[in-house]
Amino acid sequence: MTVEWQHAVAEAREATGFTGAVVQRTVEGIGAALRLDHRAAFYAELGTLSGSGGFEAFLNHWWTQALADSAPGEEAREQAIDFADVAVSLYARATGGPTSTQAEIDAIVTGAEAS
């Protein structure tokens, strides 16, 4: 796990108040946390990836799904998705990738619409 990812997760936890378990953002961690019906799709998509260009987006998408799948209820699921959205955006910003604006991140945290 990179330092940028660790910082993004810590900052997202603080911003969203998320206290749930954080799935490891690895193929193994994500695969283990997904529901069985999602796990098959995850591994099928993994098998079609060519080159590294799409791997980060693949991990981001499925990491968010794994957090949602491992949440113990609907409210926890929504909190996990908000946390994942913020963490992924902060990580993208730290690594120079596509990202959400600060207003969009704030909207996720507060549940308001971004302006």
Image (cartoon, rainbow, N blue to C red):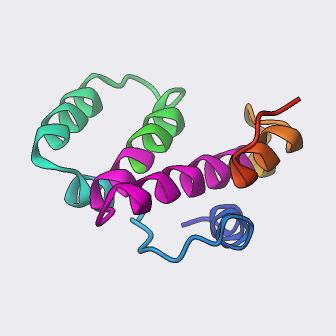
Residue toward you, 88 or 97: 88
Q: Residue at x 72, y 73 (%)?
A: 14
In screen coordinates, is 101 left or right of 31? Answer: right
Visible residue check, residue 26? no
Where residue 29 sits, quadrant-wise, is bottom left
Q: In the rendering, at what x and y percent does residue 38 appear?
A: 20, 39
Residue at position x 64%, y 72% from top? 17
Does residue 55 appear in this view?
A: yes
**Residue at horizontal 18 percent and vertical 29 percent from the top:** 44
In this picture, which residue range is highlighted in magenta?
A: 64-93
- Image x and y of residue 67, in percent: 39, 57
What main secondary structure does the magenta stretch of the protein show? Answer: helix
Indicate whether residue 73 is drawn in magenta: yes
Q: Position of residue 11 (x, y in %)?
A: 73, 68
Q: Where is residue 27 in the image (x, y as percent from the top left)?
A: 32, 52
Quadrant showing the C terminus: top right
Horizontal side of 104 relative to 33 (left or right) equals: right
